[in-house]
Amino acid sequence: GSYYSIWGSGRVIARDPVSIYAGLLTKCQERGCEVVSDFTDDGKLAAKAARGADIAIICGATATTESRDRASLSVDQERFMVEIGSLLDIPIVSLTISPGAIVMPWAHNAKAILNLFLAGKHTGTAFAE
C-alpha cells in the first residue's frame, strides 16, 4: 500500500498527495520559520542536521492492504525513530501515519505525538495545521 492512499473496500488513490514535508514547508513559509530536513533514516546524520533547531519533527508510517495483515504493529521507520529520540536534547514531535493501532517505543522521548489514520491526499496539510 501507500502511506497516502486509502486501501480496502473504500479504496481511494491519492493523486499528487501533499507529503508531510511539503505540508510543513508550506505552513512554515507562511509563518516565517525555517525547515531543515534529513531523509536518510540515519539517526546520527539527522541529529547533526537538527543542531541549533528549536524542535525536531520525526515521522514514521506503515500501510497495509485489505488482503493481508501487517507483520507487526511497528511503523516502517521504528528503528530510526527510537535512535533519533535517544540522540536529541530538543523537544521532539512525533508524526505517524497508520491504518490502525501502532506501537511507539520512542514515545517517552516525544513532547507531542500525532497519528493520522491514512488521511489521504491532504495528509501533509492536515499534519501542518
Image: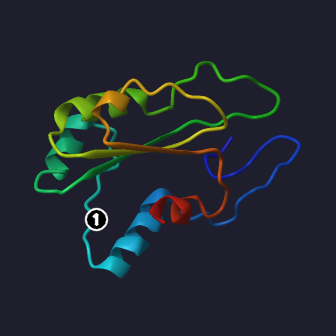
Q: Callout 1: 10 Å neighbours few (<14), some, many (20+)?
A: some
Residue 60, image x, y percentages: 46, 40
Residue 57 vs residue 50: left or right? right
Q: Residue at x 35, y 34 (%)?
A: 81
As drawn, the residue found furthest toward the right would be 9
**Where residue 102 appears, x then y in whole percent?**
55, 28
Q: Nearer the viewer, residue 97 or 42?
A: 97
Q: How many marks?
A: 1
- Amino acid type at circle 1 is Val
For label 1, the residue is 35
In the displayed structure image, the side of residue 94 where residue 4 appears, left or right: right
- Horizontal side of 17 relative to 59 (left or right) equals right
Looking at the image, the residue that sits furthest to the left is: 52
Colour setting: rainbow
- For image coordinates 12% across by 51% down, the residue present is 51
State the residue at coordinates (37%, 31%). 107
Q: Residue at x 27, y 29 (%)?
A: 83
Q: Position of residue 94 (x, y in %)?
A: 39, 43
The image shows residue 6, relative to residue 110, as above or below, that is below
Name the quadrant containing residue 80.
Answer: top left
Is 76 drawn above or below residue 73 in the view shown?
below
| Depicted 91 relative to depicted 52: above or below | above
Q: Is residue 114 left or right of residue 10?
A: left
Residue 9, percent across and down? Answer: 89, 42
